[in-house]
Image (tube, helix red, strand yellow):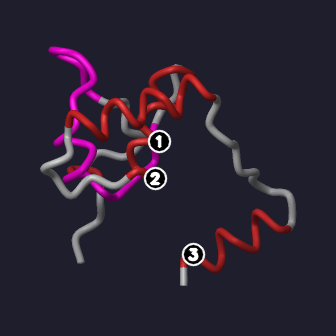
């Protein structure tokens, strides 16, 4: 399972978890208020806020949520992998 592999990599120091700053958490909560009627959850919104403030790319397969939330008019999240790049099942 990918989650276990990722968890082991965290444990081994290959990756590290970053906590959101107060500013990032505030932005995530503002987005949550704005998108309350959608299924977007706080962890995804926090990733979006952290990516925005840190000018970072997002690695996700949850394209629906990352296409639903718009930070500003014309803003799109910088996704590391686009849907069109995924291998066909």
Residue lying farthest top?
73
Q: Quadrant of the C terminus?
A: bottom left
- Asked whether disc 1 touches disc 2, contact meaning CB atoms under 8 Å apart, the reply is yes
Q: Residues within 10 Å of mark 1 (few under 14, many from 20)?
A: many
- Asked whether disc 2 touches disc 3, contact meaning CB atoms under 8 Å apart, the reply is no
Q: Is residue 8 above or below residue 41?
A: below
Residue lying farthest right?
12
Give the mark nearer the N terminus: 2 vs 3. Answer: 3
Q: Residues within 10 Å of mark 3 (few under 14, many from 20)?
A: few
Kindly identify which residue carries mark 3.
3
Real-space Cα separation, disc 1 to disc 3, in angstroms: 19 Å
Q: Nearer the viewer, residue 38 or 74?
A: 38
Real-space Cα separation, disc 2 to disc 3, in angstroms: 15 Å
Question: The magenta stretch spans which residues?
Answer: 58-76
Q: Within the image, what quadrant is residue 12 found in?
A: bottom right
Kindly identify which residue carries mark 1.
46
Residue at left 75%, top 53%? 15
Q: Residues within 10 Å of mark 2 (few under 14, many from 20)?
A: few
Q: Nearer the viewer, residue 9 or 35?
A: 35
């Amino acid at each position: 399972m990918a989650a276990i592999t990722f968890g082991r990599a965290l444990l081994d120091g290959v990756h590290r978890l970053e906590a959101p700053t107060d500013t990032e958490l505030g932005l995530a909560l503002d987005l949550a208020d704005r998108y309350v009627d959608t299924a977007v959850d706080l962890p995804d919104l926090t990733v979006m806020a952290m990516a925005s403030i840190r000018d970072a790319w997002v690695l996700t397969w949850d394209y629906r949520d990352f296409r639903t939330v718009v930070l500003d008019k014309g803003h799109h999240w910088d996704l590391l992998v686009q849907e069109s790049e995924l291998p066909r099942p």
